Image: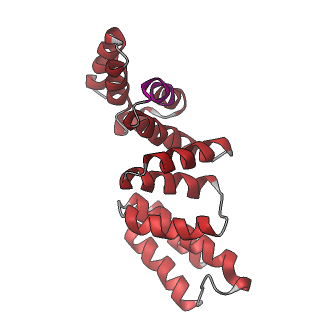
Amino acid sequence: MEIEVAELFAAQRELGKAIDKLSQILEEFKLTPNDPALINAYDEVQSRRAYFLADLGKWQNSMAILEELKDRGNDDPISLFHLGYCYLRAGKLDDSRGLLERAVSIDPPPAIYVRAHCVLGKVLYFLGEFQKAKSEFEMVLGKAPAAYIRNAEIWKWLEHTSINLGLKDEAAKYRLLASAPS
């Protein structure tokens, strides 16, 4: 029941309140990673805290939690995606790539699938693997809603990726799409 309250806060875009509620749950129920009987509950609360922290831009805090969970064998696609995102922010591109590739390979929920491909495209772009990056961004076009494409600036990423590939006509097409009114 308490976790659902935190989820309601998150659904209302009150991530700070959601994080506070999850922290309160950890304290109130004395959930720790040292109690084998409660480790699953602890991991559930901590993973949700990490997701909300990452969404607030507090990726360093999120990364510490997610690394702890990963060290215990947590291999769910949502955690892998968020840790991959944190690693991108930390400049750990090879680690980020591995986690994101793993996340998309184990059937994540649709929203995470799209976000993971988008972030993977960015990682590949920064690694100079422009053809693979382009493929990732194009996959996003086929799966994501228009608002996500606009907010994630997929057209601009495709424009710059095409420039790096020497595809001037495609770059010009994506530049036009990026500047089109929404």
| Left/right of residue 91 with respect to residue 98 in the rendered view | left
Q: Quarter holding the C terminus?
A: top left
Coordinates of residue 138 in the picture (x, y in percent): 48, 25
| Left/right of residue 26 with respect to residue 147 in the rendered view | right
- Please determine whether, in this image, residue 98 is positioned above or below residue 14: above
Identified at 36% across, 27% down, the residue is: 155
Q: Quarter holding the N terminus?
A: bottom right
Coordinates of residue 150 in the picture (x, y in percent): 36, 34
Q: Which residues are magenta?
A: 129-136
Q: Nearer the viewer, residue 104 or 148?
A: 104
Place residue 111 in its image quadrant.
Answer: top right
Q: Nearer the viewer, residue 95 or 12?
A: 95
Decide whether residue 135 is among the magenta residues.
yes
Dominant SS in magenta:
helix
Identified at 41% across, 74% down, the residue is: 17
Identified at 37% across, 51% down, the residue is: 91
Residue 14 visible at all:
no
Identified at 68% across, 87% down, the residue is: 35
- Please determine whether, in this image, residue 69 is positioned above or below residue 137: below
| Left/right of residue 96 with respect to residue 3 in the rendered view | left
Decide whether residue 24 is among the magenta residues.
no
- Please determine whether, in this image, residue 65 is positioned above or below residue 165: below
Coordinates of residue 24 in the picture (x, y in percent): 49, 84
| Left/right of residue 40 with respect to residue 28 in the rendered view | right
Q: Nearer the viewer, residue 99 or 46?
A: 99
Q: How many numbered circles are shown? A: 0
Residue 167 visible at all:
yes
Place residue 162 in its image quadrant.
Answer: top left
Coordinates of residue 113 in the picture (x, y in percent): 57, 42
